[in-house]
Image (spheres, coloured by chain):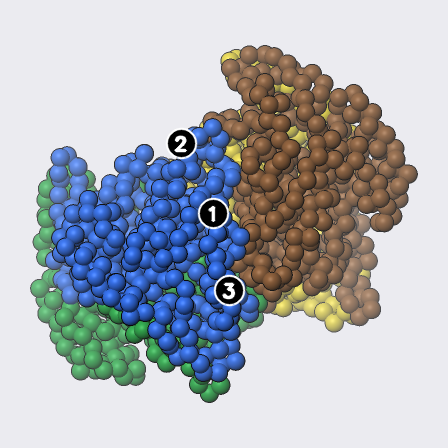
Chain colours: A blue, B green, C yellow, D brown
Amino acid sequence: MPGNTFGSLFRVTTWGESHGPALGAVIDGCPPNFPLSEKDIQKELDRRRPGQSAVGTSRSEDDKVKILSGVFQGKTLGTPISLIIENKDQRSKDYAKIKNLYRPGHADYAWDLKYGIRDYRGGGRSSGRETAARVMAGAIAKKYLAMKFKTRIIGHTVQVGDIEAVTFQEKAIEQNAMRCADPIKAKAMEKLVLETKKDGDSVGGIAEFIVKIPPAALGEPVFDKLQADLGKALFSIATVKGVEFGSGFQAARLHGSENNDEFICKNGKITTKTNNAGGLHGGISIGTDIIIRTAIKPASSILKSQKTVNKKGEETTVSVHGRHDACIIPRFIPVAESMIAIVIMDHLLRQKAIK
Amino acid sequence: MPGNTFGSLFRVTTWGESHGPALGAVIDGCPPNFPLSEKDIQKELDRRRPGQSAVGTSRSEDDKVKILSGVFQGKTLGTPISLIIENKDQRSKDYAKIKNLYRPGHADYAWDLKYGIRDYRGGGRSSGRETAARVMAGAIAKKYLAMKFKTRIIGHTVQVGDIEAVTFQEKAIEQNAMRCADPIKAKAMEKLVLETKKDGDSVGGIAEFIVKIPPAALGEPVFDKLQADLGKALFSIATVKGVEFGSGFQAARLHGSENNDEFICKNGKITTKTNNAGGLHGGISIGTDIIIRTAIKPASSILKSQKTVNKKGEETTVSVHGRHDACIIPRFIPVAESMIAIVIMDHLLRQKAIK
Amino acid sequence: MPGNTFGSLFRVTTWGESHGPALGAVIDGCPPNFPLSEKDIQKELDRRRPGQSAVGTSRSEDDKVKILSGVFQGKTLGTPISLIIENKDQRSKDYAKIKNLYRPGHADYAWDLKYGIRDYRGGGRSSGRETAARVMAGAIAKKYLAMKFKTRIIGHTVQVGDIEAVTFQEKAIEQNAMRCADPIKAKAMEKLVLETKKDGDSVGGIAEFIVKIPPAALGEPVFDKLQADLGKALFSIATVKGVEFGSGFQAARLHGSENNDEFICKNGKITTKTNNAGGLHGGISIGTDIIIRTAIKPASSILKSQKTVNKKGEETTVSVHGRHDACIIPRFIPVAESMIAIVIMDHLLRQKAIK
Amino acid sequence: MPGNTFGSLFRVTTWGESHGPALGAVIDGCPPNFPLSEKDIQKELDRRRPGQSAVGTSRSEDDKVKILSGVFQGKTLGTPISLIIENKDQRSKDYAKIKNLYRPGHADYAWDLKYGIRDYRGGGRSSGRETAARVMAGAIAKKYLAMKFKTRIIGHTVQVGDIEAVTFQEKAIEQNAMRCADPIKAKAMEKLVLETKKDGDSVGGIAEFIVKIPPAALGEPVFDKLQADLGKALFSIATVKGVEFGSGFQAARLHGSENNDEFICKNGKITTKTNNAGGLHGGISIGTDIIIRTAIKPASSILKSQKTVNKKGEETTVSVHGRHDACIIPRFIPVAESMIAIVIMDHLLRQKAIK
């Protein structure tokens, strides 16, 4: 079964190679009669766009979305929404010399094993560029959830290398290049990234996501728990190597009496006193904040010379030229938010079917 | 879309409430002509069985599997394999007094929100008892992978509370009640669990899984990466609150030049020098060890009195009587191994379809 | 992808070989809080049961259903409903002599090609016995649709051999062995079947299905039209070789001006004057009667000697002993009704998700 | 669950409204390393194109396909193949006056019931124009099956109104406007269609499809039989109102001893003497010709004035201006062939997974 479709009722299919003529997404199952414009999507796409700041890549792609179907007179039709971005700033020649090499940290070798053929230009479909399509689909889910439930998804950088954020000022997030809610640590992070870039290297980090006012009762026992589908969604982004909910890995050190969230009644509504569960009980949302943290590995493309082999297994070295992100987290955040929105949207429709 | 089926080509559907007459699994898509007996399945079921040691629950269920279909004269037919366990040691009365209460850490409240009805006896279908069905299905996948590829999945406890394993002796794992590969730390862990139990409390921990000799080229870009489906499989176990692959959360602190695994050629075969990627490149297996770590929260059922509310939102307290696991990790390990085996088996068939 | 699951939101998985220990169905996605008992299911199962009359097989299986999960205190839980029938009247020895032969009209050869192994006893899983599981699942869908929408599905025999029904008296259907709504033609049909039986032969026919008061707006463009999924459901019953909706094959002879159904307004409701479309416009239900006809081939198992080959390709003859149906239509009707009910139920939930 | 994706392993998603900017298909799961060009697809598209002859519509759309992804240096990558056609000859104004009317025979009313909104220009997504996307996807499947198995799918018109073909000359099919294998009857059919066109009316008919040298062992018991999925595929084309395999509705009149196909051994290969089963035993292909016939209703769009109602239920009349097909069968044939090819391709991959 091929893997380029995500979701069951809100169904996103993406396509496109990094250096092909275009990339896109087809969203099937979006409820009809919902206002949608290219602007709604462009807004989110711009948050992922390369060239936003010095910490990211200097490639400067416009990434202009076009809606090709599914919207009529400003409203969704209930039919598939086809979205497309034409690729423009392609420098395919950069890649010719690495076509027979396996870049460390990249999927080159894995794809050769899998398909016996690959588009080596910019990683082809294994490129992070593919995530632009996810952001377009996510923008629709985000708008729907915001309109109907006032749900919003806050993504922010909590760690880069050894630097950890210590305060949380939501407004600060979009005001610094790191998308960090701690404006002081943001500067330290930015400095680290720029130094790393100068070294021709990259650096990893941790991003946190808080879903405010999520619809309750989402998640399908036993396998399609909301927690499970969120986990899958995030691990489907190649750069993610760890995911945790609520107390996460810290829960390993706790006793049940510490980690269990006591139920209370607040303003006539049942809720919990603490939120170690990260808003997910038995994997199902109960309407409290959903808390997720993701570990992002340092970007694989670095200028520094690395040992590797070619297709024949002969040893060689590689230095990945091109215009790369020394720290991918600021651009990863809108991608992860999108995947989270898609999962919640999908489960919202799934829950509607049985209610 | 309901959530009780897992996998696309090797497809597992489970059913059953904790205190209903029986529970079971239907496995559709198992290749034909493969030798299979109840013994193959019973062996794994016994590793998950309650009552194995003092660290677990004192409930003593036989959990005897019966094969009802799909196997003929000792071989699989290619038709659905229906497996059933009759429930025997049910003490439903224990649960009558909690039928209107929401036990902290449990899914009671979430299920009421979701379905408006729930079988409160032992948690009904939200009970960990449901995972017995997963172990049965996993046993088939494990046997197939072992026979055809010599693949094996080693699960072991690496942390309980603050105690961390420091050595790895594979043979030790099944020789201590903690399923810990460090026999000295195993004793310390066991002691901690027994003390915790005496306190009417529970404790969390971390389990690691190593897939040795996995088939290569598994995982479907871009959404159904092996990493994504493994993440989903593990997060579908309610007790898991964190999952990481390879260097995982540690990757946040590293530079690309440290975290990238250099390719080398060893005995004429391409492999990597280090394994920070945990055997998954771009989410796809390359044939090297797959390394996964999962954070397990302390079991929610504790004897200690906890504050909570009832259905009406009135405050009350609850103490979860019954025979519970003070540390669930030793019994969690075969469940997680099973889910890992099911994912690999499913992706093996998916890869066969395109090769 | 294995094929033993049907439906997307109301999801039916069946299992079991004809002469195995049991057969069953798991229904996932049934809405919670819906009253359901074994009696509801048994009632429909009894309509399919062998041994109801002289026109059918003389095998006499009890076919007693047991509910193993998903129902608590008389109501559905929203969790999978596991239903089981134990096989009792098995005479496996009858089949030993045909284990290496390919019975004409049967799937024996096809299954050997497909799986390289088969349970030859009574056709194993390719047996019509498998449809008992479909009837159990269908009984749930039927009850739900009747309770919520007053929908009912009327199946009746309109042709056997060359004898065609000419009148329609709904009440007559369950009062004759042929399930024919024309009591006079029913007698002629019955006579033909008994003569055919005496000759050791079988005879085909046509059954019609009318869905009264179906929910409107069901069917998902463009591939999962209600018409498409009904067609699939009926063609998944091995004995069906033709399906038509509304004017069906007669439409080939008509002009658009004759075949188009003019819209009218009746009692303030939009409907159509004629119903050549069989209640399906663009494949979607509009709330008027859905009209379906199915061609049923004569049962393959006949006593008459037939030429065939064995596994090695050597010519031989076969006479299928055992207790077979000379005309399968009366027992086919509840099976087809069940599949129709399952499709409508599934699409009802699918439509709920977007409304 | 939305309905714009077809197939499980060879997975086709289509999108686009009749008068939107473009329409397209995304094909996921196409095996890698397979030669594919726009020419391969254009060839089939040209067979469906409007304006081929006087019997069809006089609209003249170019329908030029562009490949946007999934093909690199002339070979498939294993990644999604995105295909697009830009819409050009759109005369949207023609439709303004019918935006509140329900055209008899069309899906207008059904779509309003379903979505509460619709693109009324040319039927929007309910237009037959959508099938161009299916033809593009089918072209890939056809090429693959022809290359690997020499499979080919012959579609031809066997009846128009009361005129039935009596001879079969395969070469004649593409040499007359009716795609009829009987060149003499073809002329009579053509005459009938042109007269019908002059009357502002349309006429129905029957098309037959013969799959020569299909791969054997395709079809997944019990629900996804090849017969079931072929039935669904064909009934998903709105114009189809009947489907039959092999002896089809004629089987109703036969005895088992007449309808059963005796097995024989020919040139060392097992096959059958007759082919009443239409090449499908128990719904599974055995490698002999697959025989399918489909009843096509007369096209709904006619110039003749018809009674109908508007959205408010008020009676009115409508005459569907525009450039329509008086007989849709010649253009239906490549669409149906495509759906058949897609089903066979999908099941081929499904069978590979278990072999």
Q: For the residues tagged 3 and 1, is the chain the same?
A: yes
- Please tell me whether mark 3 sits on a helix, a strand or a loop: helix
Say which residue appears at 16% left-offset and 53% top-offset. Answer: A182
| Tag in front: 2 or 1 | 1
Who is closer to the viewer here, D166 or D87? Answer: D87
Q: Which residue is mark 2?
A: A35
Label 2: chain?
A: A
Indicate which disc residue A93 carries: 3
Residue B282 % position (x, y): 41, 65
Say which residue appears at 65% left-offset and 65% top-offset. Answer: C112
Say which residue appears at 76% left-offset and 46% top-offset. Answer: D155
Residue type beneath disc 2? Pro
In the displayed structure, does residue D164 sit left or right of residue A111? Answer: right
Earlier sequence position, callout 3 versus callout 1? 1
Q: Which residue is mark 1?
A: A85
Q: Is residue A38 above or below residue B319?
A: above
Say which residue appears at 30% left-offset and 37% top-offset. Answer: A146
Is residue C177 at least partly visible in the picture? no
Q: Is residue B91 above or below residue B96?
A: below
- Label 3, residues with CA under 10 Å away: few <14, some 14-19, many ≥20: few
Residue D191 in which image quadrant = top right
